[in-house]
Amino acid sequence: MHVDTILRGGTVFSAGADRPASAVAISSGRIVAVGDDEVLELAETGTEVIDAAGGTILPGFQDAHVHPLEAGLRRLRCDLSELPHSLEVYLDRIKAYADAHDDEWITGAGWYGDTFPGHLPTRELLDEVVPGRPVALASHDAHGVWVNSRALELAGITNTTPDPPGGRINRDAAGVATGVLVESAAELVTRLIPEPGTDLLERALLEAQRHLHSVGVTAWQDAIVGSMWGTPDNLPIYLSLAERGLLTARVTGALWWAAERGIEQLDELRTRRHQGRRGRFRATSVKIMQDGICENCTGAMLSPYLHTGGHPGATGMSFIDPDELRQIARALDTDGFQIHLHAVGDRAVRESLDAIESARRANPGADHRHQIAHLDVVHPDDIARFAQLDVIANIQALWARRDTEIVERKLPLLGPDREPWHFPFGALARAGARLAMGSDWPVTDPNPLWALHTAVHRTGPPEDPHAVGDDALHVPLEPDQAIELPTALAAYTAGSAYANHLDTDTGTIEEGKLADIVVLDQDILAAERISAVKPVLTMVGGEVVSG
């Protein structure tokens, strides 16, 4: 056995490890030894010895919920996602982009509602900087699209256009469309935008992969594999890159469940699963979106939102009838699919748990590792059900802080009674729930160190330009819901590997497992500020992909 690489001089962290270690030996893409100075004795001619210089040697981070193609496209289009929350800065970027590109449509994404007076943009703002061509800019959370008057005109949206199922055309007090289209209403415009070509889509996915590797991510679950809201089907892009060996990450694909098509689409999903196995990619999960988000009152709640203005008594939207959702869950479970549910509000979480419970009763003993993502609000009665049903709590920890977007737009809608159960990571962990972590990039930044910082402190990372507001950096959001750093690290490595069905070969550093590893620039367990820690080396299968 020839040892190709030895990582030394660091602190090895691995969930459940029973002894500390400082070195790791790698041969033919797998870990062959974990220990201390004795590992160095395995070095021979041709062995590369890499000094971790006192940093942490971790299993590669695995993002359990991410949208890389959309993120990559944002980075190649009119990208507002890394800008400060300034209306002037937004408009300057949009105008500069439009002036520099002669595209038929100006497209992009990344705006935050708290940047605008009244917390939402208007078509008139876009009309001022791009008066002639249609503009469509998705919000940072992808649950709304900001359009100008030309786009509304081309879509045929007038004051009398009805809201589509599962969506809303925002209107002012006079009933006039404001230029914000929520949830499925966005498709009234996005379906008109010319689809990007294959070359652009491949460049976008490779750019996203490059960036994810740079922050230490070695594997992920793509939370929408399919065509939705104007984004083309990404399955052929994954398969093409995987076949050519350009997909260096390990990727699990969650095939998109179109709510309006019902159970009839199951045959098509079986076909796509069969086709979707190539290289390091496999499409073995199904993504179901059960509700929207709290900020626009489409997250499904058990009791009404407060202070909703024009929507009194609103309890949000369940995109699929609960009885139908249970039927779907049973069918998918029977067919061997993992179910990956989007549930933000407490009613959507309960409906999702009920659906999985129905599947568990129909198929006891099945190991499909169903998961519910986001979990903005979970009713206390449902916390214990995650462990009881062995449902993975897929959390986006970077959201759990008191930034302006949360404090001014979201918490007033929830009210003080529900606030203690806002992102209840601590309660879920104490109840024995399996935790996996993801970013939902491009909704928020994919840097795992930032998410770990917020999971532990319930405050925003100082490095994050969107951690804005008087309390964001210093006042914890429900500190009782924080989790310990080792718990959070385990969730972002072993927990996500379990969710991705990759735990047999990845997620921990131990002999026999694949050498999917990230080296951090300091000892994360002793770091003064978690979010300041940086990856300096990322490996997949023993090959360096970043650093």
Image (cartoon, rainbow, N blue to C red):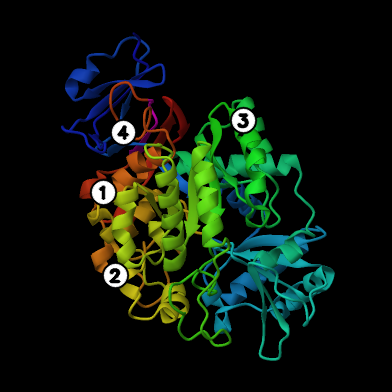
According to the image, label 1 marks what residue? Answer: 487
Residue 340 visible in the current orientation: yes
According to the image, label 4 marks what residue? Answer: 508
Helix, strand or loop at label 1? It is helix
* Image: magenta residue range: 514-520
Q: Residues within 10 Å of mark 4 (few under 14, many from 20)?
A: many
According to the image, label 3 marks what residue? Answer: 274
Q: Nearer the viewer, mark 2 or mark 1?
A: 1
Q: What is the C-alpha distance between the residues marked 4 and 2? A: 30 Å
* Left-right relation of 272 to 288: right
Q: Quadrant of residue 528?
A: bottom left
> Residue at coordinates 41% horizontally, 21% vertically from top-left?
29
Considering depth in this image, is 180 or 298 the residue closer to the camera? 298
Q: What is the C-alpha distance between the residues marked 3 and 4? A: 29 Å
Helix, strand or loop at label 2? It is loop
Considering depth in this image, is 94 or 502 the residue closer to the camera? 502
Residue 244: image location, x then y, percent? 64, 25
Q: Residue furthest front?
A: 362
Choose the circle earlier in sequence order: 3 or 1.
3
Are discs 2 and 1 less than 8 Å apart at CB? no
Q: What is the C-alpha distance between the residues marked 2 and 3? A: 46 Å
According to the image, label 2 marks what residue? Answer: 476
Q: What is the C-alpha distance between the residues marked 3 and 1? A: 35 Å
Q: Nearer the viewer, mark 3 or mark 1?
A: 3
- Queried whether the magenta region covers residue 436, the answer comes back as no
* Left-right relation of 257 to 475: right
